[in-house]
Image (cartoon, helix red, strand yellow):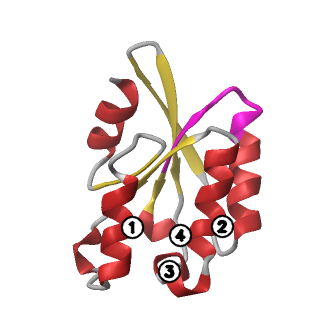
């Protein structure tokens, strides 16, 4: 796992680059969040491909559990990916509602995440 630190408008935003799934369960997300939070980061970018597909099946509660942790600790999260492949109305509604705020966002590019977080 590698990281890139992006700087935009005096904010440091960390992006995780991985070649495998790094979040399989809520504890993985909490560990990653804790590691970077204690390094002084409060904005995190993770790529959709690095999150278990189970996250996008809302019936199992994994997404809610993970995103609640990010909200509780006030760490902003951008998930970058192509969400057009999801056809479930519930996940599309979930993404839409999340994107109304700026705490947890689903975007199609790192640039879009930086524009929202750095703005």
Q: Is residue 47 visible?
A: yes
Which quarter shows the N terminus?
bottom right
| First in sequence: mark 1 vs mark 2 | 2
Task: Establish if 91 lies above or below 27.
Answer: below
**Residue that carries the numbered disc 1 in the rendered image:** 94
Q: CA distance from mark 4 to mark 1?
A: 16 Å
Front residue (pair 100, 78): 100
Task: Establish if 67 lies above or below 63.
Answer: above
Q: Is residue 22 visible?
A: no
Task: Establish if 106 lies above or below 74.
Answer: below
**Residue that carries the numbered disc 3 in the rendered image:** 58
Question: Residue farthest to the left?
Answer: 84
Q: Nearer the viewer, mark 4 or mark 1?
A: 1
Is residue 43 one of those drawn in magenta?
yes
Write down the region rendered in magenta: 36-45
| First in sequence: mark 3 vs mark 2 | 3
Q: Are marks 4 and 1 in contact (CB under 8 Å)?
A: no
The answer to whether 98 appears left or right of 20 in the picture is left
Q: Nearer the viewer, mark 3 or mark 4?
A: 3
| First in sequence: mark 4 vs mark 1 | 4
Q: Are marks 3 and 2 in contact (CB under 8 Å)?
A: no
Q: CA distance from mark 4 to mark 2?
A: 14 Å
**Residue that carries the numbered disc 2 in the rendered image:** 65
Q: Are marks 1 and 3 in contact (CB under 8 Å)?
A: yes
Q: CA distance from mark 3 to mark 2?
A: 10 Å
Task: Establish if 23 lies above or below 56.
Answer: above
Q: Residue at x 71, y 68 (%)?
A: 26
Crowd rating for badge 2 (residues with CA inside 10 Å; few <14, some 14–19, many 20+)? some
Count the marks: how many? Answer: 4
| First in sequence: mark 4 vs mark 2 | 4
**Residue that carries the numbered disc 4 in the rendered image:** 51
Crowd rating for badge 4 (residues with CA inside 10 Å; few <14, some 14–19, many 20+)? some
């Amino acid at each position: 796992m590698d990281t890139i630190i992006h700087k935009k408008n005096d904010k440091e935003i960390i992006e995780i680059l991985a070649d495998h799934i790094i979040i399989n369960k809520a504890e993985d997300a909490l560990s990653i969040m804790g590691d970077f939070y204690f390094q002084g980061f409060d904005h995190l970018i993770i790529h959709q491909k690095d999150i278990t597909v189970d996250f996008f099946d809302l019936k199992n509660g994994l997404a809610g559990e993970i995103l609640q942790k990010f909200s509780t600790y006030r760490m902003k999260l951008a998930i970058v990916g192509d969400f057009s492949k999801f056809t479930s109305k519930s996940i599309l509604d979930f993404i839409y509602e999340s994107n109304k705020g700026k705490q947890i966002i689903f975007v199609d590019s790192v640039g879009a995440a930086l524009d929202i977080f750095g703005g």
